[in-house]
Amino acid sequence: MNTEPSTYFDTLTAALSRAGVPAEQIAATVAELRGHLAETDSSPQDEFGPAEDFAARLGGTAPVATEPVEAETWLWTADIYSDRRLLALHGDQGWEVEGLDTLGRFMCRRVPGAALRWEYRRELISGKRRDEVLDRLTPEGWEMCGEWMIFAYFKRPKAASEGPAAALDTLPERPGRWLFLSRKGKVLLTVWMLLVVGAVGVTLVDVFDMPAYTTPFVALFGATGALIGLKRDAAKGCRG
């Protein structure tokens, strides 16, 4: 089997192309594998195994579909206490983060038959730290995939660090929810909602000269309504 890097990756590219893997995804995968190979200073044959077999583990020997395979998409979000754990979990299921929307939700996609495992990391990025973080992570194959407030999220295919072990043979079903909160996040959200609704109740008492004892009832009903609305929105998000 060919062991020269250029010939090896030509063979791998051809196999992935025959399987219908998008050209940009092939190029990104090959670039990450070359980077990994440069760090290990070993031959591609020793590191990844035969090119055709490695392509098979990456989904590269699947028959060419008669029609384009539609990519799965999914929006989800989590608090800062659970986002890294969940990114690792969903990345292992083949979900690639393409960005964050204005609500801070991770915009993900996954192509059946061509999905890879992804790894993620979160960095504090503000002011001068931006250039320092980018200069440190870019040579290691990390690509920024979204920003939220003072945090930046980075991704790279696990093939860059784990080689053949990163191959994804089966795809779990898309999770049936979009909102993931840790226990601490739920407590903080509940406290915040009670404070906001309580403040509204106090305002109503002052403006409309309502009895003071109505404030806790206003807070209770308001918080209940907010929770019902959040649950309804979450259900819509799961279907979207």
Image: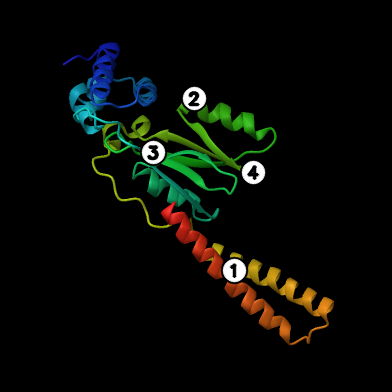
Marks 2/4: CA distance? 22 Å
Q: Reading the chain from its start, which is encountered first: label 1 or label 4?
A: 4
Question: x%, y% of residue 222?
Answer: 64, 74
The amino acid type of the residue labelled 2 equals Pro
Marks 2/3: CA distance? 17 Å
The amino acid type of the residue labelled 4 equals Ile
- Indicate left or right for 49 with 233 as reference: left
Q: Is residue 8 above or below residue 125?
A: above
Question: x%, y% of residue 7?
Answer: 25, 12
Q: Reading the chain from its start, which is encountered first: label 2 or label 3?
A: 3
Marks 3/4: CA distance? 23 Å
Which disc, if any, is residue 150? 4
Q: Is residue 159 above or below residue 194?
A: above
The amino acid type of the residue labelled 3 equals Trp
Q: Mark 2 sits on what residue?
A: 139
Q: Mark 3 sits on what residue?
A: 118
Instruction: State which quadrant residue 1 falls in.
Output: top left
